[in-house]
Image (cartoon, rainbow, N blue to C red):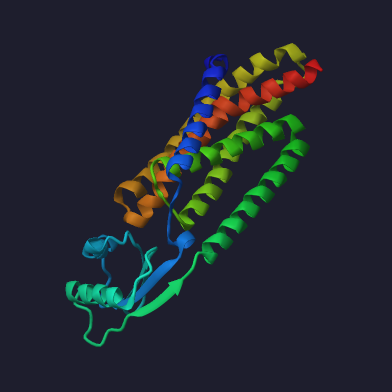
Amino acid sequence: MKILKNYKVFFAISILLILSGFASFVIQGFNLGVDFTGGTMLILPFPEQTESSLIRESLAPFELDPVIQQSSGDSETVFIKTSTSLDASKRQEIFATLKKDFSLAEDAKMQVEQFGPNIGREISRRALYSVALASVGMLLYISFRFQLSYGIAAIITLLHDVFILLGIYTIFQITLDGNFIAAVLTIVGYSINDTIVIFDRIRENVKGIGKNEYWNLTGISIDQSLSRTLVTSLTTVVMVLMLFIFGEHSVKIFALPLICGIIAGTYSSVCIAGPLWALITMRKQAK
């Protein structure tokens, strides 16, 4: 019941976080990665598997902030993507440095690909369509399975989590690349699952009660679901935290917003979704 009594505080915190993210976006924008800006990709054959951190350290003097990917086979192929458009002399300088630092074969050849931001735009467009279609589908399903008021509250909560995640990316200047799309879609699925659990408990508790009891029963339902929601979220956060602590740079970039997103999704499911549903329902009943 304490959560429900302090719903105005939680609403204010959410509004403040979203506005902070918006202000950060206006001031400094997003830190767009190579998927959205275009750039150069260097493809090199390494004699053996090499830690990405070592390659990144070797490239540090060039100030590229590259995305490094590896594909294992008979030999190790390393893909280095950078948002900087590299000319021939700069590419050869990088190749010479890597060849020296990692003992590449004398006859090793570097492949070069120049690419534009079109792929990133296409990914973004498809991601927006996916989130929009998923939101409409969830609204229809929840409205059919529960009531329209549940669906409206769930979609608002979902948008809350997406805006929080966007704010995290712009405030901390996390590189916005393909990992962002994966993080958003993961958080959308995770958040709606927690919200549905609480809504299901509310639906069971409000059967046959008078309209004046909606508020109290919502608080009771949240309390009954709280331990399950927190334990599930904590377990997930611990696992993702291990990825952040022990993973490589590219894994850390994905894990950090995922941790923040899970926390935001848990917070919104517990502190936003229930009170929002109660307010919508009571307003509807008052008409």
**Image quarter in which the C terminus is found:** top right
Q: Nearer the viewer, residue 32 or 5?
A: 32
- The answer to whether residue 135 of the structure is visible from this angle is yes
- The answer to whether residue 236 of the structure is visible from this angle is no
Q: Picture coordinates of residue 150 (x, y %)?
A: 70, 31
Q: Picture coordinates of residue 282 (x, y %)?
A: 73, 18
Against 145, residue 132 (above or below) is below
Residue lying furthest bottom: 107
Q: Picture coordinates of residue 92 (x, y %)?
A: 27, 78
Residue lying furthest top: 212
**Taking 211 as reference, is 87 left or right?**
left
At x 56%, y 19%, the residue is: 7
At x 66%, y 16%, the residue is: 215
**Image quarter in which the N terminus is found:** top right
Residue lying furthest right: 287
Quadrant in the rendering for residue 55: bottom left
Q: Picture coordinates of residue 101 (x, y %)?
A: 18, 71
Q: Nearer the viewer, residue 117 or 221?
A: 117
